[in-house]
Every structure is written in structure tokens, then in C-alpha cells.
Image (cartoon, rainbow, N blue to C red):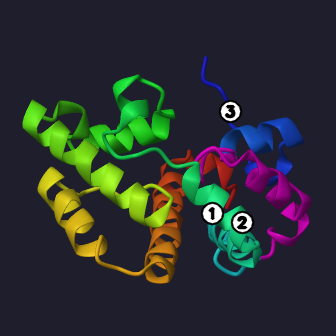
């Protein structure tokens, strides 16, 4: 027997939030805010998925600095303590594994931990990079290229990376959710 997935906009609040709560890492508040706007999503010219993507982006961009900072801080370090302890969300775990971060050699792990620490000390939030399709070497290059940035530039870059990650996660949801 196959299960049928109800389109997102026809789901009750709990189901709606369950599907979207970790699109932006540990940000159930965002799914809750989007649920309150769900009636405005149905008529988007490019479909429900585009409407959800844009609306989530807009909610974050309209948020105050402290809310945006909390969103960034909700992200785990790449190959960091949460990964080593097996405490990542399923999405983060899959993304990091896809980039080979679950199979680092001891010297590579030591380097990642040092880069994470340097980055956090400078910016007060974790290094965020949409790692889907990236290699370990490309991620290290990303750290090295971005560490010299000023806080404002890196804050904006981190938000942009969070939006990219969300786009990948939304695209990975079952097509039946979009109902279009």
C-alpha cells in the first residue's frame, strides 16, 4: 500500500510545520510564521515551491539583526562537535557526508576544528557554506577565502549560504507537497 502525501497548503498546522521546520536549521519559528502566510502562497506564478522559497527568504530578510544572528548560530560547525557526537539534523548529516566530512583523516579533522574555532572567534557564528556538490578541499578553500572578510561582509555571506542550503532542502522534499 502506498501512502499519499497531502499538498503542503492543504495540511494542518502540525504537518505543515513538520515538513518545513528544518529547512532553515533548527528554525521552527520560520515554518510557523510561514504557516500564517500560507493563504498568500497559492497564487504564485511559478508555483508553490517558488512561493515557499521566496516567502521564507523574505521573512528572514525582514527579521531584525538578532533574529538573523540566532538563525546563523543555529547552524552546526562543519565537521564539528555536533557532527562528531552524531547530533546533526538528518539534512545536515546528509549534506556533510555528501561532502566527505564524515570521513576526514585525523589531520583533516584537526584542520577543520582549527578553522571552525578561528572563524567562530572572529565572527561569533559558525562558518556556513552550502556544501552540496563541494569537496573537502573546496570547503577548506572557502574557509581560507572568507576568514579575512569583515564581520558585515561575512554576516551577509553566511545569510546567503543559509538561503542556498534552504533551496537545496526545499528541492529535496517530495514533489507531491507542492501540489502543482
Work out how far the residue at label 1 is from the one at label 2, CA to CA, in angstroms: 5 Å
Helix, strand or loop status at disc 3: loop
**How far apart, in angstroms, are the residues tagged by discs 2 and 3?**
40 Å
Foreground pick, 164 / 75: 75
Q: Are marks 2 and 3 in contact (CB under 8 Å)?
A: no
Task: Check contact, mark 1 vs mark 2: CB within 8 A.
Answer: yes
What residue appears at the point 40 percent right and 46 percent down from the top-left corner?
77
State the residue position of label 2.
66
| Mark drawn on residue 4 | 3
Evaluate whether residue 127 shows in this view. no
Q: What separation in Å lies between label 3 and label 1 (alpha carbons)?
A: 38 Å
Residue placed under numbered mark 1 in the picture: 69
Residue 55: quadrant of the picture: bottom right
Residue interval drawn in magenta: 20-43
Secondary element type, mark 1:
helix
First along the sequence among labels 2 and 3: 3
Q: Residues within 10 Å of mark 3 (few under 14, many from 20)?
A: few
Query: Residue 167 in magenta?
Result: no
- 92 horizontally vs 112: left or right: right
Amino acid at each position: 500500500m502506498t501512502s499519499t502525501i497531502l499538498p503542503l497548503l492543504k495540511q494542518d498546522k502540525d504537518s505543515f510545520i513538520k515538513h518545513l521546520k528544518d529547512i532553515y536549521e533548527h528554525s521552527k519559528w520560520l515554518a510557523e510564521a510561514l504557516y500564517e502566510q500560507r493563504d498568500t502562497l497559492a497564487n504564485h506564478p511559478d508555483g508553490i515551491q517558488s512561493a515557499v522559497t521566496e516567502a521564507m527568504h523574505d521573512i528572514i530578510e525582514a527579521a531584525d539583526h538578532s533574529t538573523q544572528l540566532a538563525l546563523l548560530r543555529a547552524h552546526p560547525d562543519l565537521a564539528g562537535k555536533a557532527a562528531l557526537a552524531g547530533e546533526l539534523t538528518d539534512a545536515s548529516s546528509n549534506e556533510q557526508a555528501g561532502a566527505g566530512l564524515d570521513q576526514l583523516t585525523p589531520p583533516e579533522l584537526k584542520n577543520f576544528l582549527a578553522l571552525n574555532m578561528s572563524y567562530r572567534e572572529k565572527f561569533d557564528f559558525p562558518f556556513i557554506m552550502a556544501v552540496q556538490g563541494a569537496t573537502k578541499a573546496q570547503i577548506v578553500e572557502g574557509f581560507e577565502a572568507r576568514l579575512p572578510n569583515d564581520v558585515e561582509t561575512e554576516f551577509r555571506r553566511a545569510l546567503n549560504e543559509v538561503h542556498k542550503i534552504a533551496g537545496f532542502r526545499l528541492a529535496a522534499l517530495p514533489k507531491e507537497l507542492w501540489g502543482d
